[in-house]
Image (cartoon, helix red, strand yellow):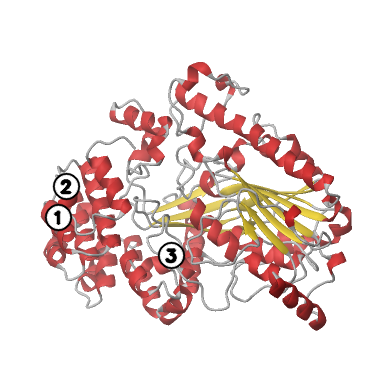
Amino acid sequence: MKSHYVCFWIALLLGNVTVAADRPNIVWLLSEDNSVHYLQHYGSPHGPAPAIRQLAEEGLTYDHAFSNSPVCSVARTTLMTGILGPRAGFHYHRKMVPAKLPAAVEMVPVYLRRAGYYCTNNQKQDYNVVTQNVWDESSRMATWRKRPDKSQPFFHMQSFGNSHESSLHFKREQMNREALKTDPAAVELAPYFPDTPLFRYTQAYYHDRMTVIDAQIEKVINQLKDDGVYENTIIFYFGDHGGVLPRSKGYIYEGGLHVPLVIRFPEKYKHYFPAERGTREQGFVSFIDFSPTTLRLAGLDVPTSMDGVPFAGPGMTAEDLARRDETFGYADRFDERYEFVRSLRKGEYKYIRAYEHFYPDSLQNNYRYRMLAFSQWRKLYGAGELNEVQARFFQPKPVELLFDVESDPHEVINLASDPQYKTVLEDLRKRLRLKMKSIHDLSLFPESQMIELALPNGIAFGDEHRVEIGELLDVVDLALLPWQQASKKIPRALQSDNPRVRYWGATACAAFSDRLEPLLPELKMLLEDSDPRVQIRAAEVLGMIRASEPQPTLYAVLRKSESNAVAVAAMNAIVFLRDHHGYAFDVDASMIKAADEPLVQRRLEYLNGVEP
């Protein structure tokens, strides 16, 4: 701790920090798995939260705040670094191997501690990068009250788990024994949900969680008041990403990304914020912006490594914030379930590019299906009891989706093929492509290769391979062309010397599943490819169109490959082809070289009928 005081006094002498008396304490209060949809403060008739509302009256409500990722480890790492996950390589949940940040790139508490702040976390971390000495204390007992000098400014982060997805992993008997404050008959279900007593109870129960969270936040507020530091403290309240009913957490829709954000600021710091207390801001802010904003509020410079931009602090104007109308989202592997999706929202329009569109949203994830509502939804689909909108969750997605999220907040009306929105579609498609190329999106390297090549310094690796990454994006985007044009370019990709080009060429083929007969010779050659990920993708594409039995290829990959990530991808393909295309598989651990990988074990449990 002494070293941090030395750093602080050196910085003070150099003029790099504001004097202590002028520096605010900063507190982050996070409700887990919590989107805007469950709070009365954001328009729901349910979920009253008077403490949060009081914070809003003494500060600002941000109506357009977004996590960049819809799951905790990726979202929190983004939040704490101000760096986009696919740029640095920490965008997979759960990590098989943690990424390393470049030298001299730190998480926000490290910068604050060097400037003399006392930094505590109570308690959740869940980072996807290698870390050490981030906090003065991170534990269930961590609090600003332990700082040795009570005049020392502090940064405190506290997470509240009562709204976590696991709170909805109840047994059916609970519905008969636990009375709710929210009337299940009064909740408004999303149109993609079946209207059942279970879904209504689940949503009502989650609205009640907001009352629990609010009471815990009030307790922290009272502690700040009791300590006499409330009027020198800026408080952020927000959800750590969206959630948590089906189709939210783990999915790139607004339910997974659009979070509540309220910032309470004392009168003495009102000049740091662009609007009057008690008002609502419409400018867009994302998790990459939270760390830069916190540093700016503390009087520090924002490191050039951060992708975000401050939305409060000295010099911020209302016009600056009003101009912000864009947010970028990413979703990749969640636990054992693979997906590669990106989104870009600008104003009222949301564009989603599903690079592996053939994977339905419903693809098995053991943890998700612990929720009774998830399981009931799937059973009703199997019984043919869902309408067209409710059934989409279990079907392949379009390659592109476009939503007007202001008029269609549940994102059920896909405008991508509507000629009236052609200009909007093309504009957002272009913006997303430019974004992915500008950050050198590492998902264009399959995870097994990213682990092998990029994790020591993903940012440097992406910069070094930016040309190839751009070319790979062009290859997978052949799926967006008319068949007449794509069919002339895909064969060159399938015959490329670069295995990643072959991989994304095969992926693009899936968009033309009913027209692939001319390409079958090239695709079948890939079943014997030197790269196991290419073999897996070829087996999936050919299996989907019934042009080849996938079992021999996938079994061979599992027997031979030592890569954990390759084994997880192969098991993902097996579950996908079994559940959604009717293939029979007989797999056990003795057939898998990387059988010890926990995510492989999850797939084996599911295939063997073990309850998640």
Depth check, front residue: 485 or 360: 360
> Residue 417 — which label?
none
Tell me how far mark 2 sits from mark 1, CA to CA: 8 Å
- Residue 112 lies, in percent from the top left, at 70, 68
Determine whether, in the image, residue 12 is placed left or right of residue 103: right
Residue at which label 3 appears: 98
- Residue 589 lies, in percent from the top left, at 19, 50
Up-down relation of residue 266 to residue 579 (above or below): below
Asked whether the residues under the numbered discs 3 and 1 touch, taking CB atoms below 8 Å apart as contact, a structural biologist would say: no
Local SS, label 1: helix
Asked whether the residues under the numbered discs 2 and 1 touch, taking CB atoms below 8 Å apart as contact, a structural biologist would say: yes
Tell me how far mark 2 sits from mark 3, CA to CA: 29 Å
Residue at 86% over, 52% down:
231
Binning the other alpha carbons within 10 Å of mark 3 as few (below 14), some (14 to 19) or many (20 upward) gives some
Residue at which label 1 appears: 555
Residue at which label 2 appears: 587
Binning the other alpha carbons within 10 Å of mark 1 as few (below 14), some (14 to 19) or many (20 upward) gives some
Local SS, label 2: loop
Residue 188 visible in the shown view: no
Binning the other alpha carbons within 10 Å of mark 2 as few (below 14), some (14 to 19) or many (20 upward) gives some
Q: What amino acid is found at the position of numbered circle 3 in the picture? A: Pro
